[in-house]
Image (cartoon, rainbow, N blue to C red):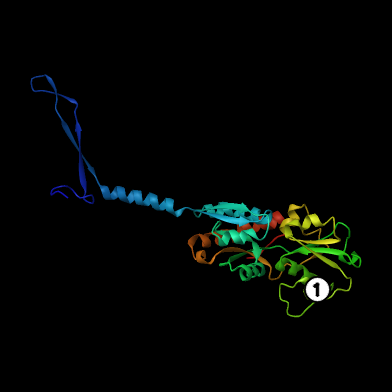
């Protein structure tokens, strides 16, 4: 740097030249430069720029995977609350229970809200996902529905009952039937029994495993179908009034928000969970779903 040039960090005076016509001493007009001195403090400007940049950087956008129905509707209620804390939420709907965890593990979304802990544990064990729960959301008691019978006891011997084909939700139904005395299961099956674990089936019921999203369509072809609440509401069923059997709402199947393990301590995670766990969201759930979906925080 040449000697005598000012440094950028110094306070600098900028000199503006005004070439407005000026009168000579004897009345003639000539262009005499007029110098105006204006103080200009660079550090103050840099501080303002940095403050604006910091405010912009504080706003963050995340993508959350959900299944259609209550999960998506509840997150829509969470969005404006999170927005006030600088978190912009974008929702992506998935039509099944498999893709949301794959998308999360791959980094295509930052969180998902659709599953319970036993299902997540099963997915992690089977697929090696590095994702985990950061907060509880709501409970969806699973129900058994029928277009042909008004009570489960009316199903004839050899009747067909469809259950979800994933181990967690299929297991929920078998545990429900065990608790109602319909079947018996092997000891020690935990939360994920399968039809192979049935030790006693007095009515010789035939269990047909179907994809959870397709369960409402199976109603016409079976005596009864076990249907998750989100898919039941999509099909126009009332999860409180319509089931001929309904799971106890208190149990291990509370739903959750999941994120990648590497992200669990990031500030936006706390904002997301805190925004979900608000009185406004709880009131929305209770009013909107009238007992079909229950807050679990």
Q: Which of the two residues, 183 or 22, is positioned nearer the viewer here?
A: 183
Instruction: Label 1, secondary structure: give it.
Output: helix
Query: Could you say where residue 124 lies in the image, as x and y percent from the top left?
Result: 61, 69
Task: Say which residue appears at 22% left-offset and 43% top-offset.
Answer: 39
Task: Say which residue appears at 80% left-offset and 73% top-offset.
Answer: 178
From the viewer's perspective, is residue 26 above or below residue 217?
above
Looking at the image, how many numbered discs can be counted on the residues? Answer: 1
* The quadrant where residue 246 appears: bottom right
Task: Say which residue appears at 14% left-offset and 27% top-offset.
Answer: 32
Q: Is residue 287 left or right of residue 225?
A: left
Asked if one can make out residue 238 in the rendered structure from this viewpoint, the answer is no
From the viewer's perspective, is residue 218 above or below residue 265?
above
- Residue sitting at the far left: 26
Residue neighbourhood size for the residue with mark 1, other residues' Cα within 10 Å, grouped as few (<14), some (14–19), many (≥20): some
Query: Could you say where residue 185 lies in the image, as x and y percent from the top left?
Result: 79, 76
* The quadrant where residue 214 appears: bottom right
Q: Which of the two residues, 286 or 139, is positioned nearer the viewer here?
A: 139
Query: Could you say where residue 37 lies in the image, as x and y percent from the top left?
Result: 19, 38
Q: Is residue 76 left or right of residue 186?
A: left
Residue located beneath label 1 in the image: 178
From the viewer's perspective, is residue 57 above or below residue 261?
above
The quarter of the image holding the C terminus is bottom right
Query: Could you say where residue 233 lies in the image, as x and y percent from the top left?
Result: 74, 54
Q: Which of the two residues, 6 or 106, is positioned nearer the viewer here?
A: 106
Asked if one can make out residue 98 in the rendered structure from this viewpoint, the answer is yes
């Amino acid at each position: 740097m040449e000697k005598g040039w000012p440094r950028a960090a110094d306070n600098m005076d900028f000199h503006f030249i005004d070439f407005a016509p000026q009168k000579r001493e004897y009345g003639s007009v000539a262009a005499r430069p007029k110098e105006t001195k204006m103080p200009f403090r660079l550090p103050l400007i840099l501080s303002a720029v940095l403050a604006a940049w910091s405010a912009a950087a504080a706003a963050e956008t995340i993508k959350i995977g959900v299944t259609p129905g209550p999960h998506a509707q509840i997150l829509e209620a969470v969005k404006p609350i999170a927005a006030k804390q600088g978190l912009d939420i974008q929702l992506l709907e998935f039509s099944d229970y498999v893709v949301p965890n794959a998308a999360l593990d791959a980094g295509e979304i930052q969180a998902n809200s659709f599953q319970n802990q036993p299902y997540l544990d099963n997915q992690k064990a089977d697929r090696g996902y590095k994702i985990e729960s950061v907060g509880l959301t709501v409970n969806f008691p699973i129900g058994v529905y029928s277009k042909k019978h008004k009570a489960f006891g009316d199903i004839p011997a050899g009747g067909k009952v469809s259950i979800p084909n994933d181990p967690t939700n299929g297991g929920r139904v078998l545990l429900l039937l065990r608790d109602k005395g319909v079947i018996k299961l092997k000891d020690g099956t935990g939360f994920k029994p399968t039809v192979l674990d049935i030790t006693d089936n007095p009515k010789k019921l035939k269990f047909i495993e179907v994809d959870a999203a397709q369960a409402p369509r199976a109603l016409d072809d079976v005596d009864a179908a076990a249907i998750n609440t989100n898919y039941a509401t999509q099909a126009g069923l009332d999860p409180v009034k319509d089931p001929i059997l309904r799971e106890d709402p208190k149990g291990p199947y509370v739903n959750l928000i999941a994120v990648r393990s590497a992200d669990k301590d990031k500030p936006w995670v706390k904002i997301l969970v805190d925004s979900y766990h608000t009185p406004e969201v709880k009131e929305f759930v209770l009013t909107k779903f009238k007992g079909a979906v229950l807050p679990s925080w």
